[in-house]
Amino acid sequence: MRLDDFIQAAREFSVCAQRVALALQHTPSASPGRRPTDLHVALSLDLIAFTEGSPAAVAHLERSDGQMALENADFGEQTYRALLNGIEAVAQDTAAAPLGFDLGVLMKLRDFGRVFNRGVSRVEFTLNHRPRVVKAVYDPPKQEKVRQRIAKPEAQQQTLQGRLLMADFKETGRQLRIHPPVGSPITCKFSEDLSAEVEECIRQFVRVTGKMEYHSTGEPRWLEIADIEPIEEPAGAVSAHETGWSYSFWENLPAAEYARRQGVQPVTNIASLYGAGEPEDWQGFDEAVESWRGEKEET
């Protein structure tokens, strides 16, 4: 296993544990923002050894004497125990979520499974603490079960792939834009539960799944996202750098050069700038503008 892949997998596992800890505290695990310091302290692992033969990484969970003596006071152990029990429970054919698991935990566990694209066939976990040893195995079949739990059966569900180059996190309307390899960008809407995942995927090639809304003309209006996942960039895809989304702030380039770098083409049909549109799309717009103007005058 490549070192970079191991580091990435360890990072995904660490974030997954943090999300389980938040879910155990009845907090949405994918909520944006910094994690509390005491949470990091309770879950911090020290890598202390690699075994030979069947390779295994050995990590130590630091804890105080008080935590060792009182089982219920060891929040770190409770979190990792819930995580491993949950990994085993996700394969069961039941709609109930395992203890400490919510959508954010499932998504990060799904992301951890990217190690299976790097020559790893299965990952075994063992929590050696107290008489009750906890073991769990995560493999491609369980990752598929996790995907199914995330997606949930829904009519008219579609999947798109492309680069995520724009995201708006306003509470009044969270939206993002996916640029597929071929065709026009697709506007997508997402819920607060997906904010952390969207933030991690900015400028990456992603796969999004959800329900598509259409205009009366049959053109896509937007996709209501149920799941978003970073994926490998397909061969021949234009990278974020090649599209011009990465250049010096102080570059003084002509507008034509900026357009070339960003892949912008001359407009041949003015309607393409605003799409097909529907009358209800503009309902309340004039009233909102007047309200904003009034607020500005009052200040």
Image (cartoon, helix red, strand yellow):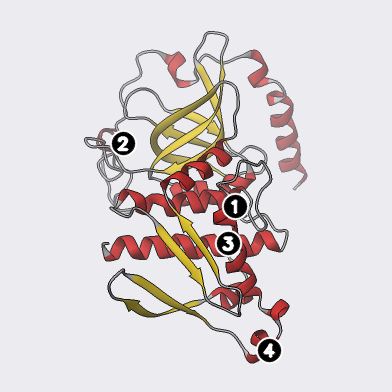
Give the x, y percent position of residue 132. 61, 74
- Tell me the amino acid under the disc marked 4: Gly
- In the picture, measured across the screen, residue 163 lies left or right of residue 128, that is left
| Figure quadrant of residue 182 | top left
Q: On the image, numbered disc 1 is attached to which residue?
A: 89
Between disc 3 and disc 4, whose residue precedes? 4
Give the x, y percent position of residue 265. 30, 24
Label pair 3/4, CB-CB below 8 angstroms: no
Q: On the image, numbered disc 2 is attached to which residue?
A: 262
- Tell me the amino acid under the disc marked 1: Ala
Q: CA distance from mark 2 to mark 1?
A: 46 Å
Q: CA distance from mark 1 to mark 3?
A: 10 Å
Between disc 2 and disc 1, whose residue precedes? 1
- Tell me the amino acid under the disc marked 3: Leu
Q: Nearer the viewer, mark 2 or mark 3?
A: 3
The kind of secondary structure element at disc 4 is helix
Q: CA distance from mark 2 to mark 3?
A: 43 Å
218 and 251: which is toward the camera: 218
Q: On the image, numbered disc 3 is attached to which residue?
A: 83
143 and 168: which is toward the camera: 143
Q: CA distance from mark 4 to mark 1?
A: 30 Å
Q: CA distance from mark 4 to mark 2?
A: 58 Å
Q: Residue at x 38, y 45 (%)?
A: 204
The kind of secondary structure element at disc 2 is loop
113 and 52: which is toward the camera: 52
Q: Residues within 10 Å of mark 1 (few under 14, many from 20)?
A: some
Q: On the image, numbered disc 4 is attached to which residue?
A: 66
- In the picture, measured across the screen, residue 236 lies left or right of residue 209, that is left
